[in-house]
Image (spheres, rainbow, N blue to C red):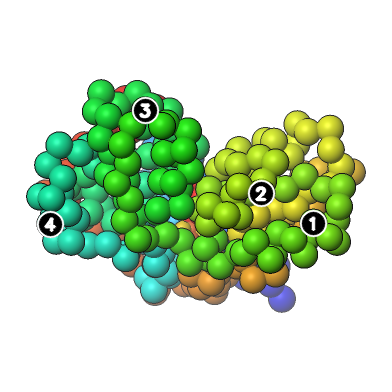
């Protein structure tokens, strides 16, 4: 029974003083054993406040790295070492170093969904919630925004006074959604508000009633007087919203909007990580730790 595995995890958590973090895209049976559920940066902040010496991140690699950077004295594990984010890993340090040489007077803004190694050569990090505020606050009017060109496009349209350089990167899960998906969903639910994540393509984002981060979408849906919503982000958010707002109705923009990288972590992985037979301890070189921390600290200072 799934509950037997969950009970074993809960027992081991207590015995071994472990805190379990689960990104809100994780499978439900993992969410049930987590101490905190949320978006990646919020989880890192929560982990930095707990007294537990060991933290297990159920999410993708860059998220576990962010946890380690904010809690360097804790032992941090990624529950499934193969869980990576294709967007975070699509641009390497050497490529971006070359782009920087071409645009020396540009401030490099990195989405938090990047490797720690890449963060070391960027000026500041942003989350999807803080990107607009931070880009606006920067002294520089020239911004090289990496890696997500869709998020970068959405920010740039709101800051026409700044010059943005975007590269061809992004989230394959969100980029899959099309205008056709929006037309189909709106035809099926004509009264529904359409809420979308800015990792989606600009032509999809242009059709939305609200554009925002996971947290933004959830707050908008909870506070809105509307009763029906089409959700243009990872489909776990449809379930979270339906649980939190039982009187409202939520529909996925597309049945395909599932992040298989996030779903790679299983409950058994979490159990084995608690036992110490699976998972990977996140160890960052001093140079990477210092460089990536500077980029994240700048985000905290500006955000
Ligand atoms: P946010 O939760 O920061 O909006 O990001 C969505 C996402 O794609 C996480 O990997
Ligand atoms: Fe990466 Fe996209 Fe999955 Fe988020 S949803 S972890 S950005 S691939």
In the rendered image, residue 261, in percent from the top left (x then y), is placed at: 48, 69
The residue carrying mark 1 is: 186
Question: Where in the figure is residue 56, as x and y percent of width and height?
Answer: 43, 56
| Quadrant including the N terminus | bottom right
* Marks 4 & 2, CB-CB < 8 Å contact: no
**Mark 3 nearby-residue class (10 Å; few <14, some 14–19, many ≥20):** few
Marks 4,1: beta carbons within 8 A: no
Label 2 belongs to which residue? 207
Upstream in the sequence, badge 3 or badge 2?
3
Q: How many residues crowd mark 2 within 10 Å: few (<14), some (14–19), many (20+)? A: some
The residue sitting at the right extreme is 247
Q: Is mark 3 within 8 Å of ligand 1?
A: no
Circle 3 residue: 161
Whole-number angstrom distance, CA of label 4 to CA of label 3: 26 Å
* Ligand 1 is within 8 Å of the C-beta of the residue at disc 2: no
Q: CB under 8 Å between callouts 3 and 2?
A: no
Above/below status of 152 relative to 78: above
Q: Tell me what residue is drawn at x 42 percent, y 59 percent.
A: 170
Disc 4 vs disc 2: which is toward the camera? 2
Q: Is residue 136 above or below residue 286?
A: above
Residue highlighted by disc 4: 98
For the point 78% across and 48% down, the residue is: 229
Whichever of labels 4 and 1 marks the residue nearer the N terminus, that label is 4
Q: Residue at x 35, y 23 (%)?
A: 137
**In this rendering, would 283 be left or right of 214?**
left
Report the mark closest to the observer, 4 or 3: 3
Q: For the residue labelled by badge 3, is the local secondary structure a helix, a strand or a loop?
A: loop
């Amino acid at each position: 029974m799934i509950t037997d595995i969950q009970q074993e995890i809960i027992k081991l958590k207590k015995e071994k003083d472990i805190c379990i973090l689960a990104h809100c895209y994780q499978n439900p049976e993992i969410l049930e054993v987590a101490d905190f559920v949320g978006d990646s940066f919020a989880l890192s902040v929560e982990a930095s406040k707990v007294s537990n010496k060991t933290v297990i991140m159920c999410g993708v690699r860059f998220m576990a790295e962010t946890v380690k950077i904010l809690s360097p004295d804790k032992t941090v594990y990624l529950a499934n070492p193969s869980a990576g984010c294709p967007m975070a890993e699509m641009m390497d340090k050497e490529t971006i170093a070359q782009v920087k040489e071409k645009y020396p007077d540009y401030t490099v803004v990195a989405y938090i969904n990047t490797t720690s190694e890449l963060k070391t050569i960027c000026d500041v990090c942003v989350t999807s919630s803080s990107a607009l505020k931070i880009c606006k606050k920067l002294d520089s009017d020239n911004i090289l925004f990496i890696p997500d060109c869709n998020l970068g496009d959405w920010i740039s349209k709101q800051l026409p006074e700044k010059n943005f350089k975007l590269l061809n990167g992004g989230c394959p899960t969100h980029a899959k959604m099309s205008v056709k998906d929006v037309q189909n969903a709106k035809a099926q639910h004509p009264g529904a508000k359409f809420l979308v994540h800015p990792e989606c393509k600009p032509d999809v984002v242009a059709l939305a009633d609200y554009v925002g981060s996971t947290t933004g979408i959830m707050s908008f849906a909870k506070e809105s007087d509307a009763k029906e919503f089409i959700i243009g982000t990872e489909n776990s958010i449809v379930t979270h919203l339906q649980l939190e707002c039982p009187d409202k109705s939520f529909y996925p923009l597309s049945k395909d909007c599932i992040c298989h990288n996030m779903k790679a972590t299983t409950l058994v992985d979490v159990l084995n990580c608690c036992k110490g037979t699976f998972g990977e301890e996140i160890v960052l070189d001093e140079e990477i730790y210092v460089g990536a921390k500077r980029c994240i600290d700048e985000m905290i200072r500006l955000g």
